[in-house]
Amino acid sequence: MKNLTLPVIQNNFDCCAPVQSSGSAYPSIHQPFVAGSFQTTAGIFPQVLSNLTWVDRWENIKARWGAGRMNYSIEPGLYALNNPDAASPVLVTANYKMSFDKLRQALAGRNLWILVLDTKGINVWCAAGKGTFGTEELISKIETGRIKEIVSHRKIILPQLGAPGVAAHEVKKRTGFKVFYGPIRARDLAVYLDGGYKADTEMRTMTFPLKDRALLIPIELVATIKPFLILSLCFFLLAGIGGPGNYWGNLFHYGIFSVAALSAAVFAGAVLSPVLLPYLPGRAFSIKGFSIGMIVAIVLLYVRGVNFSAWPDKIEALSWLLIIPAIASYLAMNFTGATTYTSPSGVKKEMRFALPIQICAAICGILLWLTSRVIS
């Protein structure tokens, strides 16, 4: 999209405010989502609005499906939401654009400042765990954004999920700004602000309902497309060897079932695991994924009508009882970073014991499947 020259929107700070140079550390006003420029005594800052455009919404949809997600970021720095003044609140977020959009959308009709930290395009929760949404970055942006010259108060509001990465006392000591931790969800911010920066128990409680779990499914499915197609093609072509019929007959009988089995494994791990998460046994996501994968494998073999009187069929059935749960277990672990079910240390511990088991199960399953094709 071609950037247009945006008009300068004056405010009640100073109509003769200095114009920043091209080498400024401030975020550019020539970003597609920026509505205009906002002039203050400290310089010119981008102005954004609460209403999202159709372009913003389409970009969010694409990001949900993994298209350009790794580059879905905005320039860090200070932004003016609508028409703030010196008394307006200062809210902090990550430079992952979806986080930024959710924040401004939740504050329709309000005038405030949004300070965007450089989290390398990662959302607040994950960035706090990785250290990019942290004390030093916050202090740096407070200083380079010249917020002290813009607002008359010394209060700054951070998302609660960013708390693990920020030492509030250090921020206060070095900048003079007192840190307030807002509610978990952006939709509660209006009530939080109107209530004098006070959050009730519900605002402080992190949940992972079906709606939130379902939102994660598209990107997980997209991420599996390439490996799924490669693996399916290999199984399909190898299915023609051995067997009672000719090559093409075996492809139709065993090859199509192999693709269906792999599809079922992906469906179990990337769809059924998050949907049925609270009802699956175990706390570890790998166990939850393995259990639903085993159920899917048993149902699939039952529907197919495996002949357990023949050794090739017995071996093939055993192979899928290893492959499908292994894949489902691995895919289910991708949801660990989006829930309070686990902690960073818990995830690392789970991966140490689960990954070797998943790899061994998958390899053994593939070898058994190849054996079933050779001896049939």
Image (cartoon, helix red, strand yellow):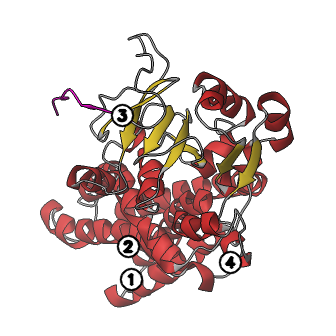
Instruction: Name which of mark 4 and mark 3 comes first in the sequence.
Output: 3
**For residue 171, what is the image quadrant?**
top right
Which residue in the structure is indicated by mark 1? 300
Give the residue drawn at x 67%, y 82%: 281
Instruction: Name which of mark 1 and mark 2 comes first in the sequence.
Output: 2
Instruction: Name which of mark 2 and mark 4 comes first in the sequence.
Output: 4
**For residue 247, what is the image quadrant?**
bottom left
What is the C-alpha distance between the residues marked 2 and 4?
38 Å
For the residues labelled 2 and 3, say whether their Cβ atoms are less than 8 Å apart.
no
Q: Is residue 343 left or right of residue 214?
A: right
Which residue in the structure is indicated by mark 2? 264
Quadrant assignment for the N terminus: top left
Give the answer, above or below, for where 55 lies relative to 138: below
Secondary structure beneath dot 2 equals helix
For the residues labelled 1 and 2, say whether their Cβ atoms are less than 8 Å apart.
yes
Which residue in the structure is indicated by mark 4? 202
Say which mark, if any, is on residue 342. none
Say which mark, if any, is on residue 10. 3
For the residues labelled 1 and 3, say whether their Cβ atoms are less than 8 Å apart.
no
